[in-house]
Amino acid sequence: MLDRVSRTGGDLLPLLAQEPAKPAGGAALDQIVIATGGAAALTAVLLVLGWGHRTGRITLLQRLADLSERGPGRGLPGWAALPSVVAMLSLLTALLGMYWDISLHISHGRDEGPLANIAHYPILFGLFGIFTAGVLSVVLPKGERPGRAAVRITRDWYAPAGGVLLAGAGFYALLGFPLDDVWHRIFGQDVTLWGPTHLMLIGGAGLSLVAMMILEREGRRSFTGPADARGSAVTRWVRRGMLGGGLLIGLSVFQAEYDFGVAQFRLVHQPLLIALAAGCALVAVRLWGGRGAALFAVAFYMLVRGGVSVLVGPVIGELWASVPLYIAEALLVELAALVLIRRPLLFGAVSGLLIGTAGFAAEFAWTQVAFAMPWTGDIVVEGVLLATVAGVAGGVCGAMLAEGLEGRLPRPQVARPLFALAIVAVGVAVANGLIIHVPEGQRATVTLTDVRGGEDDRTAHARVELSPRDAVDDPAWIAVTGWQGLGLHVEPLIREAPGVYRTSAPMPLHGSWKTLIRIHDGRTLAGVPIYLPADPAIGAEAVPADPEFTRDVQSEKSILQRELKSDVPGWLWLAASAVVLLCTLALLIALGWGVARVSREYPHRAAETPREMAAT
Amino acid sequence: MTPLDGVLATHPIVSAVPFFVPTFIVVGVIGVIIWRDRRRGDEEDGAGES
């Protein structure tokens, strides 16, 4: 059974408790040799199969493509069917690896190298699989031009635009690995999901769904097989619903810190990100798939994300990741569609508005039961505002995505500024969320009452008295967080009197645990360390948990991310971030180009619109 | 070998090898094919490959 406070689904390996001090940078050479060997073999297989296919010497790829054309990729030519299957399996692998990996980092702390952590392997294989799927789609079409939107490789070799973009998204995600390592070298390990290079890893995978949607469109319109192999309207509805659900999952990965209850950023980001993902994915899938597709997408989302949470939590025995509900948002989108489906951009904007307001209310209620750090009144005004901005921006982008896929993208003079405006709006909203304030002159007096007093198993209750007493009025959270002690302990404090709080469960104060009080009120984001072990690899001294002590309310970053180097000049951080930002904009613009290209090359045919025909 | 007494790669690019180089090679191979095709196009324009 899941323990709500410790949030673990099983016993953690006790052996690991005796591990030696961890180095804080670099990778062991043996790990690199093993991984290089594996990667070289994979590359060789991909190159040989591709070369063999194009010269006609090896028919394995063709046979696999034919097989997937008859099976799960029904109604798509092999060059779209096989990559879709490979990409879907790869994405699931990467997703499992990602949540497993985050869970390990929360309970165990930083890695000893890029391959010291077992969960990095599914991520690596998953991302390489996405790249491979794209390459397969580029390599497979032989002796035919794969549709009108295809990109010329040589005079007699054309590749589907969706395949090129899929390979590009995989490439972008994999680029995150080396850049991540360089980043750690320069700035120290950033133990947060929201490091710029970490965002590349997960963002590339998440956005590959757009490339898969483009590939589906190209494949369906180029299919020349017999009519009975085309696949029914239901097949199409289900496949598009799954792609939409996949996009919802892909856009939701950015919320993972909030799902685990260890967000290192302001709480208002969570409604913002939920509204952005719901607006974009649900509007797109409802327009593209037809009636009920938004609800189906959420069902698919629940199945996959719930499945991953169950696998990582109870099955593997790591931490439980909560899942936002999205059902209310899907219902709102379906409702808006009843009235506005023929005016897609307005439909997207109105859906976003509903998601940012009514959807916010539904998720607010859901967080009270499902999340370790539930939303409070403190974030309502700003949360609704940011969620509405993100919801509308996402909804408009989702509408343009679906319209582009259906060959009805608004003309470039409208579509381009709208796309740019949406990106800027989301950028400004996120930037606003990142602005925090660390109070000065506030102190906390903590009195500990030991529950277990041993060296290796000490736990204690705490009474916390803030000074001044009115430092916090209606906080977004005031909680004890303990992590990296082979588990996670998140527990909101109970208010006894103004400025006086106590714990409701004993907190861990031993071994490698890092335990602190976290305070978040409005823009204030700060912490008070209770217990931190010595960490010789980064030159950090222990912070002991004396029976009674008074400490400053201080920046959380220096407690939660002790690995960060403090002597790096600011311009270097800006320059490095700019490189990552440019890569990200390049990917977004490339995907926009792809959508515009399929829209131009495959203009809408009146007979195929799913809006008029319910899935039968 | 425990990570503590193991040799650490001292340059970031080395530890990035398995993650980055395979994709780089594949992209490079396709890039070379494109480059050769474009160059050939100037000399024997229109001649298709069988």
Image (spheres, rainbow, N blue to C red):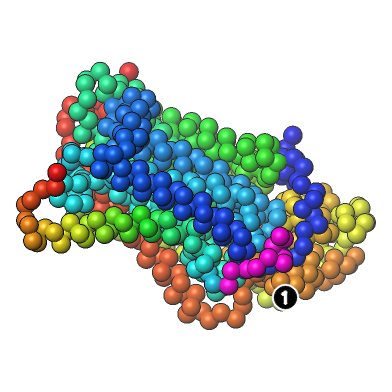
Percent position (x, y) of residue A414?
Answer: 21, 53
Percent position (x, y) of residue B1?
Answer: 71, 60
Instruction: Determine which quarter of the picture holds residue A56.
Output: top left
Residue A447 left/right relative to A478: right
Which residue, given by chain and number where applicable, does mark 1 sit on? A539
Percent position (x, y) of residue A63?
Answer: 33, 30
Query: Looking at the figure, which quarter contains the C terminus of chain A?
Result: top left
Q: Which residues are magenta?
A: B1-10
Q: Is residue A600 magenta?
A: no
In the rendered image of this protein, does residue A527 appear above or below residue A375? below
Residue A420 left/right relative to A563: left
Res. A394 in view: no
The disc labelled 1 sits on which kind of residue? Gly
Q: Is residue B6 magenta?
A: yes
Instruction: Determine which quarter of the picture holds residue A8.
Output: top right
Nearer to me, A212 or A525: A212
Q: Residue at x 72, y 67 (%)?
A: B5
Res. B20 in view: yes
> Disc 1 sits on a residue from what chain?
A
Q: Residue at x 66, y 42 (%)?
A: A320
